[in-house]
Amino acid sequence: MIDPKILAIQFKSRFGDWPQIYRAPGRVNLIGDHTDYNDGFVLPAAIGFYCWVAISKRADSDFVIFSENLQDTALVRDVQESSGVVAKWSRYPRGVIRELQSSEYDLRGANIYVSSEVPMGAGLSSSAAIEVSTAYALLGLFGHKIEPLRVALLCQKAENHFVGARCGIMDQFTSCHGQTHNALFLDCRSLEYRKIRIPDGLRLVICNTMVQRQLSSSDSQYNTRREECEEGVRRLGKVLPSVRALRDVTLAQLEKNRELLSDAVYKRCRHVITENDRVGRMASALETNDKLAMKDLMHASHVSLRDDYEVSCAELDLMVSLAAQQDGVYGSRMTGAGFGGCTVNMVLGDFVAEFQGHVSAAYLAETGRRPEIYVCEAADGAAAVEFKK
Ligand code: GLA
């Protein structure tokens, strides 16, 4: 866990003055993957891994951004410059600066020091965490009101426009609105949400396969999935004119019109429609502490992502099947975009240590990769952080 005072001292020794500090968390999604950009439902929780940003004003209009993790500095002078020539990590803060400026926020120059605890390329939204923490820091530093929903939408735009991933709203929304002990049951069309308390005694255990989401190829596969969903909407919309997104299609309507769709598009649609239904049922299962229902729903979600949406991989499938063999586990599935990354598991507190030991050893024996296993609590969203000089 990063100590804000140490971060402030590091900032001061690099840039010469004391900073303000902000932080924004990564997230884990309990259920509802690849539904957000289909106007559907998701059930994520922010986790206690944060991206921290220390910031102070500069006399000129430059933005100097230092990444502690990568030991790299980016200079943003003309934010309209081509994104092709800059280091990939810096596209996130650059995109945020550009979106804030084009939304008419007045920003002058700043020194920005970024240090992140969110594992990168693991599907835990390290990107949303850097975007949201940078946005909070810039808005806070220049005295603008911080409106979490507006920030989430603006950071999503930054990622869509500047990084080129056509992501939905889930990650940025969760990073802004996370609540300790709770998941968020979010309607991605209306952007209304309800807190869903995670039953006491259950821990969120995240298993990192250590298969990195290969950002460029997974971004392009992600975008392809999104296009397949859009094609489903176009074709189904010809016979069902009220359909604006897959959110509006029932399973019966899909089955009835199956011949309008290619096999791949049919399967993508079936995943989204059944997954939306599972999200609502999972919210109820959490509220009534129905652990067996949680387990079934998470399993069905994994199978659907694996077989219909085709975004799992051998390592994720193995991690899920190893988890299923452990005692005290009430649900296990891949989480996030897929193509590598992590699984999320609901584990009874008393069984966590045993779970970690067994899953880790078995996964290492089968794959030769040592997994990382994080035991998390649902955490609070982005905020300014006070520290004593
Ligand atoms: C990524 C995207 C999200 C969402 C998930 C899959 O994390 O950023 O918007 O689509 O994948 O559920």
Image (cartoon, rainbow, N blue to C red):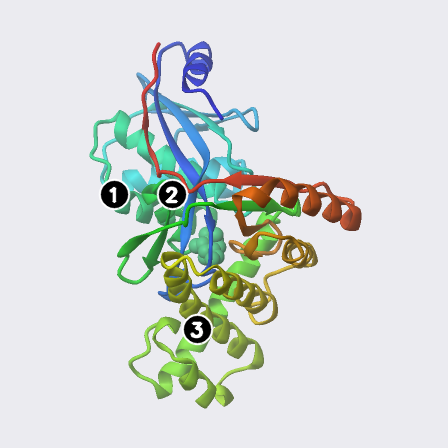
> Are there few (<14), some (14-19), or many (20+) residues within 10 Å of tag 3?
many
Q: Position of residue 389 (x, y in %)?
A: 35, 9
Q: Amino acid at mark 1?
A: Ser
Question: Which type of secondary structure does the marked residue at label 3 adopt?
Answer: helix
- In three-dimensional space, the C-alpha distance between marks 1 and 3, rounded to whole angstroms, equals 35 Å
Residue 295 shows in this picture: yes
- Mark 1 or 3: the one toward you: 3
Q: Amino acid at mark 3?
A: Ile
Quadrant of the rendered structure where residue 132 is? top left
Residue 51 located left or right of residue 97: right
Q: Amino acid at mark 2?
A: His
- Extreme-front residue of the structure: 350
- In three-dimensional space, the C-alpha distance between marks 2 and 1, rounded to whole angstroms, equals 33 Å
Question: Residue at (48%, 68%) from the top-left corner?
Answer: 227
Residue that carries the numbered disc 3 in the rendered image: 273
Q: Position of residue 182 (x, y in %)?
A: 37, 47
Residue that carries the numbered disc 1 in the rendered image: 103
Question: Which type of secondary structure does the marked residue at label 1 adopt?
Answer: loop
Question: Which type of secondary structure does the marked residue at label 2 adopt?
Answer: loop
Residue 121 shows in this picture: no
Residue that carries the numbered disc 2 in the rendered image: 181
| 3 and 2 marks in contact (CB < 8 Å) | no
Question: Residue at (74%, 43%) from the top-left corner?
Answer: 361
> Are there few (<14), some (14-19), or many (20+) residues within 10 Å of tag 2?
some
